[in-house]
Every structure is written in C-alpha cells, then in structure tokens.
C-alpha cells in the first residue's frame, strides 16, 4: 500500500495530456511543503465558505413547508418557477442534508434534520407509483401524485440513499428496512429480471449496459456498507461485480471509456457504442477508487487513476475554452446530442472530487495540479457570487446558457456533495501534512481510508 | 375573399416587432413592381438551385442499396456515421421523393422513384412492431429489426404520408389502403382511446394536449384529401376539429401561442404550460393557412397570420443574434431545456414557408419582408456551400454547433420541402405579377388555391 503523501513522479512526466509538464515536489523542500500547505489551506477555506453559501441557498428557497419535500425548480435568485417534485432530487436532498448533519458539526441543526425528515416522509408516502409495488415515479406533483415514471432504477436508488442516511441520523429502523428492501428490489431488476421496470425488449435493441447502472449500484454498496459489517459483507460480492462491470467500459486497448458496452463487455456499433461522457467516467473513477481503497488493491487504484481520472480529462477537457465537454464520440465524430459541447456543473464537481481523492490516495502532484485546474475553472465559471449556488449549464465558451439554479436534473446534491467531500479531504490532507512536519514523525502516514476520504 | 396581390398596410405600421417600420408598396408604382418582380425572380432561382443541390446530397449519400430505405445519420460530407433507420425519417424521405417526382418535372427520374419505392417496401415490411398491430417502431436496425418504440402517433403519421404519396405516384392501390387504414388507427388513438399507444395515465399527469398532435393530423387531412373529393369529405369534420384544437393554443388574450394546453383549452401550470416553440407555431401557421384557404375563410386567414406568423416571429426572433429561438417560456423565464437558445434549421425553413404563403395569400408586403429576412439569415447561416445540404444546429450566436447533416431527427424533409414549396409559391407569384402587368388585365387575380400554394 503506497503511503499517503509519498511523492510519486508522474509516469512520462506530463500526465494530464495538455502539454504542461508537472513538477514533482522534492523531498525535504520545506518551502515547497509550506507552499503546498498554504495552497491546501486556502482551498479548504474557499470550499468551506462556498458550502455554507450553497446550503443556505437551498435552506432559504427549497423547503416546501406545506407538503414536505423540496422545490428544486429554482431560478437564479431562488424563486420557484415550477413546483413539480422530481424523485431523484427529493432523495438526493434528503441524503445530502442527513450526510451534512452527520459528518460536519456546523450543519448539525434541527432545521436541516427536520427538512430531511419531512422529505423522507414525503418519499415514503408518495414515491411509489402503486404500493406495495416498489417502482417509484420519476416526478410527482407538489402534493405527491405521480406525473411520470421512468423505466430505469434511478428514482429507487436515490430513494434508497435517502432512507439509509435518514436511518443513520435518526436511528429509526423503519428507514433502514425501507432502504434494504428497496436495495433488494433494485438488485433483482439489475441482475435477475428487468421486466418489472416495464421496458420492452425489442429484437433490434442490443443487450447493452449503460455505465450508470453498475456505478449507481456500487455507490449504494458503499452507502449501505458504511460502518456496517454485516451489510458490507452481504454486498461484498455485489461490489466486486459492479467494479468489474464498470471496468468493462474501458475499451479500445485502454484508450477510451465508453458509456455503453454489450453485456459481455464488447464495443457496440454506431453512436450508442461510441458515446462518451467524461464527467461520468470521472465520477465512476472516484466510486472505483473508494472501492479499491476499501479492498486495499493498489493495482486497481493505479488503473483507476489512469483510466478513469487522467484519460477522461485528457480527452474530455476542451483545449480551446476549458471545461469538460458533456458528450463526445470516441472516433472524434460529432455527437448527435444538441448539448454535447456545453459545460455542465456536475462533471466539474465530480472531477474535483476525483482528482482530490486521487491525490489524497497517491500523493501524485499531477493530480493536485488537475484538482486546482478544474476547481479554478469551476469556481470562476459556475459560481454565482450574487445569489449563491452555481449555474448549471454554460455554453461551450463558458457563458451562462441557463440561469436556473435548479431544475428537473439539478438539485441540492452534486455541488454540496463535492464541497463537503473536498473540505473533508483537504482537512485530512492538512492534518497529515502537519503530522508529517511535526518533529519526530518522519514516516509517512497510511493512505486515507474510504471514511477519511469521504 | 381578399385579392392575391392587393396591398394591405400592416396594422400599426411595424408588425414584425423589431422596430423596423415596413413600407407598403404603392399601387401603380411600376418601378416598385419591377423591383418586386426581380426580387421574387432572384429568390426563385436561388431556391431552385439550392433544392437541386440538397436533393443531390441525399441521392448521393443516403440510399441503402442493400436493404432499401435510407441512411439519415450523415456527417458533414455525407459519410454514414450510424446505420440506424429512424421511422419518421424513412417515411418523410419516401414522401419527399414522391412529392418532388409528382410536382416538379425535373425530379421525375426513375432513380428517385425507385428509391422511394424501396423505402416504402422497407416500411411495409418492417415498420410495424407486431403486425397485424399498427403500432410502428421509432427506430429500426439497418435490416429492419425494431430498436425503440415511442408511445406517440408520429411514426405512424409519417408512414401514412409516405404511403399516400406512393399511391399518388405509382397508382398502386395497396399503398393507399395502407395509408387509409393507418389513418383510421391514428384518429382512433387521438380521438377515442390512446391506451393502445402504451403510455400509462397517471393521477398527477394533467390531461394535456401537445400542439403537435392536431397539427400533425391536420397535415394528414390535407395530404389525404388532395384532389380526392371523397376522402376530403370524409375528413372535413376532422380537419375542422384539428383547426379548432390548434387555435386553442393561442392563450393569454391572444398574446402567446403555448405548446401545451389542457384538453379543454386552458393554460396548464408550470413549465409545461408556459412552454413555447416558435418554429412549431409558424409551422402550425402554414398548416392552418392552407386549411383556411381551402375553407375560404378570410377571418380565419387574418387571425392565423396575426397569431401564428407575426406573433411567434415577434417573440421568437433573437434580437441580438438573429434567428428563431428553439424554445421559450411565456413568462420570459429561462427554459429548462439545455438547447433552448440554439438555432435549429427547421423553424427557419417552416418560417420561410409560412411567410411566403402569408404573403401569397394576403399581399401584405410586411410578410414578404419577413420572408426575405428569415431566408437571408437561413441561407447565410445554415447552408453549407462546401458539401451541400444544411447544417441543422447552430449555437445562439449562429455558429455551427453540430456538423452533422442528418441524424435521429434531421433527414431529407424540412429543407427540400421548404425549398420546393417556396419555388412553387414564387413561381405562382411571378405568374400572377406577369398577368397583372400584361396589358388589359388590371384586376387582381384570385388568392392562390391550396394547390397553387403548395
């Protein structure tokens, strides 16, 4: 297992693929160490303050005091422009509030906990389309009537995350049994029989796998197994299966992460097969990195950093205007999605997590450099200094294309999750630096545990 | 019935809403008449040449000689980047080829007819998911296996258009019976029972109507009723019903065309209710205008020009960069669709048809001015002088955002339909001008018939 802050020269010098040769810091360079410490400290403060502002935005504007749950269709200044309730975003906000409450002392407020519980009750009462069936709606009216159902597993996954975190903060067993039962249903849909999702299997449709499915499941394995040996044990095989399935998306002799592959891990034909989503690959990167750290698998960690962090950045970063493209075609052809060249907030927040986690794990200064590069772009382009929260959608050149702060797919999730995780990782890095610099401790501390990195 | 070239001053002077005051031409101004004639003649030539280039592009690159039908996923230079066959686009290309063959002498070639017939046979054999059921797939593999099914009526509508035109050019009755039977099924889904489409009715989903449905049906009524008194009679009530349903989408005291309204014609709440699609309103405009001309209803014609031509242009034209926005929010809020500010080819081709038809019908020079303004922008921004056909997707500023010439939603349809219809309308206008200017004919000719305008 490599030491946390052990300096590793990036292989081949330049690993970010953008022509900038990274300098490895030199052992014993006290000034460099002090500069690094100051840099990490400055980012920790920046990230912490931003987290406070972002949470304040959602607390001020999103709570539905009448029906419980959250408004997520919020304009630039927080005004509600639609009162529909998207189940993904309800589950995510419940999860986020609980996670903040549980992990960061300053968010341990009754206001956050009460809103999370009201959101949880809203989900318990209304999310399922036809109880006791477990299929959840995609979007509900403000008062909980189903508007649309997606024939996928994602509403149910965010429902599960919400319930598990609610159990962790409240100790109420009913939340946990909801989480575990829903998880069982999801695993059944994914591994046994998807027919309950309602999507017909057509003779011309290839048996394809979207990377989103094993990613999401791996994230749930991580969530449910935290400090719970029994569940972690129950899901150990599932976690390995998810990791193996995600790794199958590395194709073309390791030169591309493809969003869709055949069920036996082959490239699919046409646009579907060539489709790439750099932000998704980076998110999968940190999911896998946590998995590899849990497993104590150094080979997997190096592979993940190479294929899911450095490769997607190299191919996905816009050399002209900066920022990560939303979609790409592995052959360099023009994607058919109209928004392919837009810059979305979440690939950038996921990249920040991934690079900082990669650096925390490997000590490779190239990864710290990439964290700073992405974070600089992200704070400069997405942050709204006037009203708080981040813009979600920029055009290719980095200009705000949609002024909304929340919508059908953007809620209280990626931004605060990124900021909270980065704050904790920066904190851990600074502690380790202080420990390493204090007299009498010359040895490097161990690599961060998944908990330390979260 | 107002005379074809009778000059009408635009009410209020400036009707395009962009601050430009339109000048009405003066009766008896021979020089103005001559300038107008020259302008129309120049556009007729430009449009005709462009049509030749566009058709040549599709003939060269899109024919699948092996399986029949058409490749529509074509890159900038015509290269096939995916061989999936989208049923909308198969039906549209069959229709387009037959229509060109039937209406414009220079396209009466065996090559076009054979390709149309091969496309028709491909549809007959493969479009339906589970024959004898009439539900058609949305997309098929190259060899005709269904990949995806949409729970809407549109694949079936384009299938019907294709079959009816095939019957018109070949005289083979089996095509016409396919068309008429499919039409019967579509009308049943729309007016009697939509459950066969497979979309569940959920308690929170408002009973809403998308303008696309009555628009599409009205277009089919026009198609099937052409020079066919019996069918025209059979569908007369349906045509009136469609027109009335489309007119219900004019809301807010006549100040906005809304894309979705309740089934009884009220504004819906939230984003769904405020959603606007200026290009769609303009397309509905020329569908309605043809209906009004068929009916000989001058009041309806004036209303349609006001509400479906001038109003969507006034609100939908980008004052900063030119071009029609793709989507808007009736309250001026930011739409949630990522592509809302992009400029798509088809709203512009539909606007060209609508304004030229409005001018042909009313003689209002403001409408000719708008035709020229849209056509100037369109030819400048969308046309590809290098490889032919038009780009489909520009960013807000008018830069090409996707270099593809065809894709899942862009095929051989909107561009050649626009060019062919404009060529015919310009031709008719020039003939009428010549007639009006020839000695001894001082009276204005009658307004164009729907056929004359088509």
Image (cartoon, coloured by chain):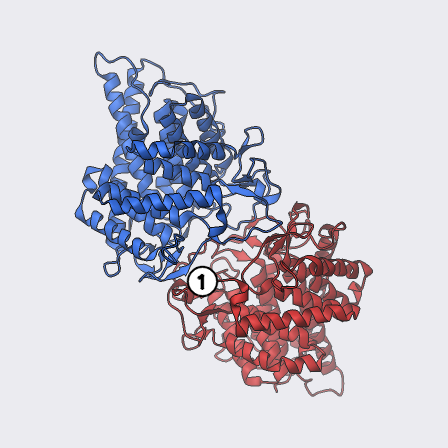
Chain colours: A red, B blue
Q: Which residue is drawn at 24% across and 24% down?
A: B431
Nearer to us in this view, B385 or B437: B437
Q: Which chain carries label 1?
A: A
Indicate whether A126 appears above or below A308.
Answer: above
Q: Which residue is drawn at 42% across and 42% down?
A: B187
x, y percentage for residue A412? Answer: 67, 58
Is A121 situated left or right of A155 in this image?
Answer: right
- Quarter of the rendering occupied by the N terminus of chain B: top left
Is B292 situated left or right of A112 in this image?
Answer: left
Task: Rate crowding at label 1 as few (under 14), some (14 to 19) or many (20 or more) other CA atoms within 10 Å.
Answer: many
x, y percentage for residue A288? Answer: 57, 76
x, y percentage for residue B414? Answer: 35, 43
Residue A325 in view of the camera:
yes
Q: What element carries label 1?
A: strand
Q: Name the residue under label 1.
A: A328
Hey, which residue is sitting farthest left in the picture?
B110
Residue B78 in view of the camera:
no
Q: Residue at x 23, y 19 (%)?
A: B435
Q: Which residue is drawn at 27% across and 41% down?
A: B99
Nearer to us in this view, B39 or B300: B300
């Amino acid at each position: 297992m490599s030491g946390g802050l052990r300096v590793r020269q990036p292989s081949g010098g330049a690993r970010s693929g953008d022509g900038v040769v990274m300098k490895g810091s030199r052992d014993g360079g006290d000034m460099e160490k002090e500069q690094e410490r100051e840099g990490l400290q400055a980012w920790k403060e920046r990230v912490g303050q931003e987290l406070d502002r972002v949470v304040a935005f959602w607390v001020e504007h999103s709570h539905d005091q009448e029906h419980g749950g959250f408004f997520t269709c919020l304009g630039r200044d927080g005004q509600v422009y639609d009162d529909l309730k998207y189940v993904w975003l309800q589950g995510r906000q419940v999860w986020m509030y609980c996670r903040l409450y549980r992990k960061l002392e300053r968010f341990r407020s009754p206001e956050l906990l009460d809103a999370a519980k009201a959101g949880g009750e809203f989900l318990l009462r209304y999310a399922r389309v036809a109880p006791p069936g477990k299929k959840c709606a995609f979007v509900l009216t403000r008062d909980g009537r189903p508007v649309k159902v997606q024939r996928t597993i994602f509403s149910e996954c965010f429902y599960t995350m919400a319930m598990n975190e609610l159990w962790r903060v409240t100790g109420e067993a009913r939340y946990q049994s909801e989480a575990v039962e829903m998880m069982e249903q999801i695993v059944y849909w994914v591994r046994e029989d998807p027919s309950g999702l309602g999507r017909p299997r057509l003779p011309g449709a290839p048996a394809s796998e979207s990377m989103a499915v094993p990613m999401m499941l791996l994230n749930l394995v991580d969530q449910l197994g935290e400090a719970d040996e029994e569940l972690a044990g129950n899901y150990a095989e599932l976690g390995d299966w998810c990791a193996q399935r995600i790794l199958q998306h590395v194709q073309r002799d390791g030169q591309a992460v493809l969003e869709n592959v055949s069920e036996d891990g082959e490239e699919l034909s046409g646009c579907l097969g060539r489709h790439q989503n750099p932000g998704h690959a980076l998110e999968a990167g940190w999911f896998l990195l946590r998995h590899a750290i849990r497993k104590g698998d150094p080979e997997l960690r190096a592979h993940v950093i190479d294929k899911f962090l450095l490769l997607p950045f190299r191919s996905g970063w816009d050399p002209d205007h900066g920022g990560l493209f939303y979609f790409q075609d592995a052959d360099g052809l023009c994607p058919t999605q109209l928004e392919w060249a837009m810059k979305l907030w979440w690939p950038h927040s996921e990249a920040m997590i991934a690079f900082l986690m990669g650096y925390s794990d490997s000590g490779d200064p190239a990864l710290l450099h990439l964290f700073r590069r992405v974070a600089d772009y992200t704070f400069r382009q997405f942050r709204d200094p006037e009203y708080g929260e981040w813009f979600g959608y920029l055009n290719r050149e980095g200009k705000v294309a949609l002024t909304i702060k929340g919508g059908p797919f953007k809620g209280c999730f990626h931004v605060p999750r990124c900021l909270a995780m980065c704050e904790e990782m920066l904190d851990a890095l600074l502690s380790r630096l202080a420990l390493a610099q204090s007299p009498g401790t010359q040895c490097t501390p161990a690599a961060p545990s998944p908990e330390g990195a979260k």
